Image: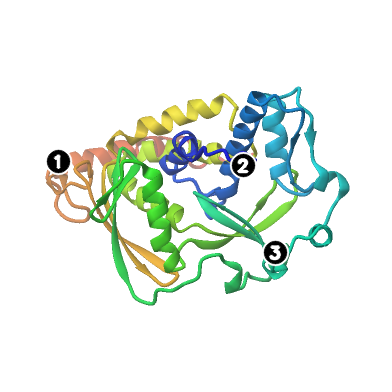
Amino acid sequence: HKTIDVIDEYYQKCIRFLVYGNILKNHTYPLSVSAERVFQAMAIADAALKMKADYIAHGSTGAGNDQIRFDMIFAILVPDIPVLTPIRDQKLSREQEIAYLEKNGVKMDWKKAVYSINQGLWGTSIGGKETLTSDKTLPEKAYPSQVIKDDETELELNFKQGQIKGINNNSYKNPVEAIEALNVTGSEYGIGRGVHVGDTIIGIKGRVGFEAAAPILILKAHEALEKHVLTKWQIYWKEQLANWYGMLLHEGQYLEPVMRNIESFLEDTQATVNGSVKIKLAPRRFEIIGIESENDLMNSKFGQYGEMPSDWTSDDARGFAKIMANQISIFRKVNNGKKKS
């Protein structure tokens, strides 16, 4: 048995770009499993080459996304090593798997196996009988972390060039440590829970529960900070490219060269994403209080929204409005009175 630890690589080559892009699949899911599977597959492929393995095996079913992610990465990186997929090929159900394990002397509380749990750095997914329906929700017992806090507290997340570097008065050299610490705190309040409904790679709709306290808090805090320090066109184009990045990653296309191009753009936008974000936590909810940043473009010396301008005159504003209206005015003058054919 060999354990492969690629958590730091996973953060540096993937998670930080998810943060830069504020990426939530369908505005909901932080790609907890989607991103992780690709790096698991790449690590397995590398290990298989080094040990000169005759075969690679994975336990995916034939009705999910993971089979595609694993098979694609293996086909690209280790095309000459056969891949064994016994659960998919034999169409084994969860009940059949449990019966086989019991027959071979494996003893455990099988009630816990009712739910499929995938726990990782960027969140935990939960699947069960409820997520196979469209109208039922997961019970409290399905979540690995239980709500134990009933008060309110405030946190301050500190960012430098888009990466989380501190929580309150604690600084972290490695953002992975900050993520792990924030996950503990957020999970105690039941933060980051949700149910994601989306389109699978194979074309069917899928539904999965998740808990991702640290990812949700970091993404929302980072997004709030960016609203203050980036221009509107930086924000606009970053959203467009981030959506593509998330979709391609979700579908196992991490090795597609365009992903490196998008990463370069996302990273370049983060030079001014510096500062702190204050958040209030309460049981099962949170609130962004505000931000502080030396790069804040909402600087009062240039003017306050709805109040008095500091950097332009009333004549400047009047002329600006006239020019902004120019093309629409021309269009109406040319086309008014003309009937549509």
- Amino acid type of disc 3? Ala
Label 1, residues with CA under 10 Å away: few <14, some 14-19, many ≥20: few
Of labels 3 and 1, earlier in sequence is 3
Of the residues tagged 1 and 2, which is closer to the observer?
2
In front here: 70 or 137?
70
Q: Which residue is mark 3?
A: 113
Query: Is disc 1 in contact with disc 2, using a CB cutoff of under 8 Å?
Result: no
The quadrant holding residue 324 is: top left
In front here: 338 or 25?
25
The Cα atoms of the two marked residues, 2 and 3, are separated by 21 Å
Label 2, residues with CA under 10 Å away: few <14, some 14-19, many ≥20: many
Can residue 201 be seen from the camera position used here? no
- Residue at screen point 42% across, 33% down: 266
Q: In this rendering, is residue 260 above or below 310? A: above
- Residue at screen point 77% across, 48% down: 61
Q: Secondary structure at mark 1?
A: loop
The Cα atoms of the two marked residues, 3 and 1, are separated by 66 Å
Q: Secondary structure at mark 2?
A: helix
Q: Which residue is mark 1?
A: 312
Most distant residue in the bottom direction = 150
**Residue 337, position as x, y percentages in the image:** 51, 42
Quadrant housing the C terminus: top right
Of the residues tagged 2 and 3, which is closer to the observer?
3
Residue 7 tag number: none
- Amino acid type of disc 1? Trp
- Residue at screen point 59% across, 33% down: 43
Q: In this rendering, is residue 190 above or below 216? A: below
Q: Which residue is mark 2?
A: 37
- Left/right placement of residue 148 relative to residue 289 reads right
**Residue 112, position as x, y percentages in the image:** 67, 67
Most distant residue in the right direction = 90
**Residue 310, position as x, y percentages in the image:** 12, 45
